[in-house]
Image: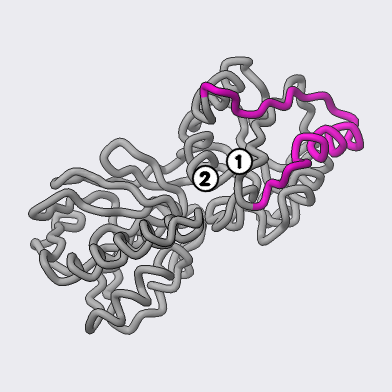
Amino acid sequence: MKSRQKALVFKRIAVVVNPASGSAGPDAVADVERILAEAGVTGEVTTPGEAGLEACLQAAYDTKPDLLAIVAGDGTARAGAELCGPKGPLVAPLPGGTMNMLPNALYGGRDWKTALADILRDGVIKPVSGGEIEGKAFYVAAILGSPALWAEAREAARHGDLKGALIRARRALHRAFSGRLRFSLGGRPRAKAEALALMCPLISRAMEDDEGYLEAASIDPGGALEIFRLGFHAALGDWREDQTVEVTHIRAGRAWAAGRIPAVLDGEPILLGRVVDFRFRPVAFRALVPRDTETTA
């Protein structure tokens, strides 16, 4: 049983808000200020200007807050957690985006307003482990290989770029079986598959939250239709239910392909190099979460 943490007192709170992100809303700044006032705490609320979200996030971090709260999309949530790291300020990556993979894992489906009010009233510190691939962190799941290309099509469609979504979907179909991913997991013999998924302890059903491994699954869908289904749902964790997955626990590994490797890190599509190393991070950052999401005594 875990001992009950004392109530936290914050001297400085910084909140980064992107009103244009998926579920933040145009009144997000006013809502944050109201919630802070109701909780009896003061904080500096900033929004991205011409310099963009990355600069806004860095500026908020540079004020050396006790807590950095983020109401924005998945990419910003991941960037904020990476910026603070295990020794920096507490992080509250609130569900202000569309998929909200990391926020939902931490806040149990609460909307961002409820989550913010709950952690200010009675929040506790939660050390969060994760993974790292090619210098980029992920805290929920990473998908490597051709199914990740469907995430690019999904993102284009989400932003109303139907032509771009169609182009990316065609490219995904073309790449689906043109070159398989090769990998070595924890020193085991080399293997190959259509995709490789890495799940962090935060949401893995097969591991305890504090277990020191990543859950790795090689995935070989049976055809283009299965690739399509997997690609659109992989970042939601549905790959774990696929009959073709083969799961193992690892601390490190390597993957390589004939060309650059498409990937999805915590819901965000990116393009990696041709050879990538990945590893487990025991404590990646410290989150502020509602007390009832943790087992306390």
Q: Residue 128 carries which label?
A: 2
Question: Measuring 18% from the left and 43% from the top, which residue is drawn there?
Answer: 273
- Reply yes or no: does residue 178 show up in magenta: no
The percent position of residue 179, horizontal first and vertical second, equals: 11, 64
Helix, strand or loop under label 2: strand
Question: Mark 2, residues whose alpha carbon is within 10 Å: few (<14), some, or many (≥20)?
Answer: many
Judge by depth and name the residue closer to the eye, 134 or 30.
Answer: 30
Q: Which mark is residue 287?
A: 1
User: Dividing the picture into quarters, in which one does residue 170 lie?
Assistant: bottom left
- The reply to whether residue 249 is in sight is no
Question: Measuring 84% from the left and 42% from the top, which residue is drawn there?
Answer: 121
Question: Measuring 40% from the left and 73% from the top, which residue is drawn there?
Answer: 240
The percent position of residue 155, horizontal first and vertical second, equals: 44, 56
* Proximity of marks 1 and 2: CB atoms separated by less than 8 Å: yes
Magenta segment, which residues?
A: 23-51
Check the picture and name the quadrant holding the C terminus.
Answer: bottom right
Q: Image check: 113 left or right of 139?
A: right
